[in-house]
Amino acid sequence: MQKIQAALLLAVTLLAACSTTPLQPACKPATCAPCPTCPAASAAPTPTTPAPFVRTYQPAAWLDLPGWAEDDQAAAWPAFMQSCRGMASKPHGASWKRVCDLARAADGKPGHDVRRFFETQLKPYAILDSDSETSGMVTGYYEPLLQGRRARTKGYEQPIMGVPDDLLTVDLSAVFPELKNKRVRGRLEGNKVVPYWSREEIATRGGKLPGKVLAYVDDAVEAFFLQVQGSGRIKLADGSLMRVNYADQNGHPYHSIGRLLVERGDLKLEEASMQGIQAWARANPTRLDELLNANPSYVFFRELPSSDAGPIGALGVPLTAERSIAIDPRAIALGTPVFLATTRPNSTQPMNRLVMAQDTGGAIKGAVRADYFWGFGKAAGEQAGRMKQSGRLWILLPPEAAPK
């Protein structure tokens, strides 16, 4: 027991130094595992405090929200009820209790005017980033459908892995309170704690990892994008659907393979959509492993009961197609209603609607940043894969949660 406790204490100290979180420089200190892209250093670099995250809420009027009067807010009501359920267990849920109690009392009653409810109970605030910019990037994601088997068979050889038994997850806020929600991952190697295996190392080790493989699918590219999306369904041999959802991650930073293809000249910027990357992969099968391994991040999954509801987001409730978004929780508290003003994928056609902040993502960083959930299946994937638009966000808050 003392050895385990000592190892965990070492994990907190050493992994904090080896972490890829903003606490540390990009290169690892000499006590960590070798960093192939870092220059040699004679001493460990001095930890630096991350720059404070800045976001501003600017009071607005309902008339400032483009398309608010034309939106069907009733379509967002079920998602809002899910948000109320999810926020009830969160620290900020107390400031929503009165509004959510009123919503539950009004839910399903004849003549309930959803738009009037939001306008009388909440106030809009425009979200600005650290540079006082009101516009940011809006991307899309979806729940894919893959073909797979529970046991490895010919043609079904790409593993969808559960969380390995040897993965250590350390909450840094236990030592550094200012690093709330920051976690690092690692593993024990003898009596040392080292970073967990990278994507390439996991692939090389194959079945040697101590953990359960949930299923095997038929396509390495689809398996990769399942990790990017964070959830999906797998159609098994008997026609049943197996649902998998994000469980954990190996602790390595996410690197965009689309950006890499553009930098190498393999794709033009406008071609670097999910569909463009998939097309490149089909045309270059011998270079696929090299491309995928350029992103060292690796996602582990858990199996969930089959359901027609959306996948479970970071709030702990099912996502609603076209009414849920993923956000940076430093800017927007999970569960909060948000009005999104953007355009449809690859177009200038306005897409303005009320959505709920119910999910997060490793690549969703910034105050004016959103990932729009399109739903399940191929059609949703086509929209999500092409979406990289400019957009604005307004957060809707009750008086109890008004910014000070």
Image (spheres, grey):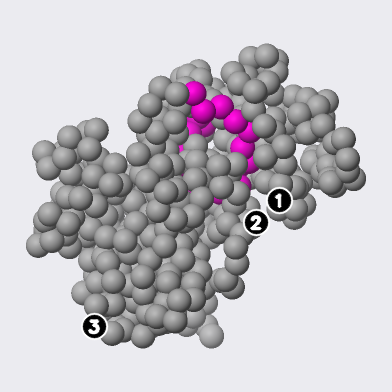
Task: Give percent across and percent down for residue 261.
Answer: 18, 44
- Asked if the residue at tag 3 contacts the one at tag 2, i.e. Cβ–Cβ closer than 8 Å, the answer is no
Which amino acid type is marked by label 3?
Lys
Between 245 and 377, the one lying in front of the other is 377
Residue 154 circle label: 3
Between 365 and 171, the one lying in front of the other is 365
| Snapshot quadrant of residue 236 | bottom left
Determine if the magenta segment contains residue 368: yes
- Asked if the residue at tag 1 contacts the one at tag 2, i.e. Cβ–Cβ closer than 8 Å, the answer is yes
Q: Residue at x 23, y 66 (%)?
A: 200
Task: Give percent across and percent down for residue 347.
Answer: 38, 26
Determine if the magenta segment contains residue 179: no
Horizontal relation, residue 391 to residue 268: left or right: right
Q: CA distance from mark 3 to mark 1?
A: 42 Å
Task: Give percent across and percent down for residue 119.
Answer: 78, 25
Which amino acid type is marked by label 1?
Gln
Q: Residue at x 49, y 72 (%)?
A: 241
The residue labelled by disc 1 is 82
Task: Give percent across and percent down for residue 394.
Answer: 61, 26
Residue 59 in view here? no
Q: Is residue 11 above or below residue 281?
A: below
- Name the N-terminal-most of marks 2 and 3: 3
The residue labelled by disc 2 is 317
Disc 2 is placed on an element classified as: loop
Query: How many numbered circles are shown?
Result: 3
Horizontal relation, residue 203 to residue 64: left or right: left
Q: Is residue 282 above or below residue 330?
A: below
Q: Nearer the viewer, mark 2 or mark 3?
A: 3
Give the magenta-colored segment's residue range. 350-369
Quadrant including the C terminus: top right
Disc 3 is placed on an element classified as: loop
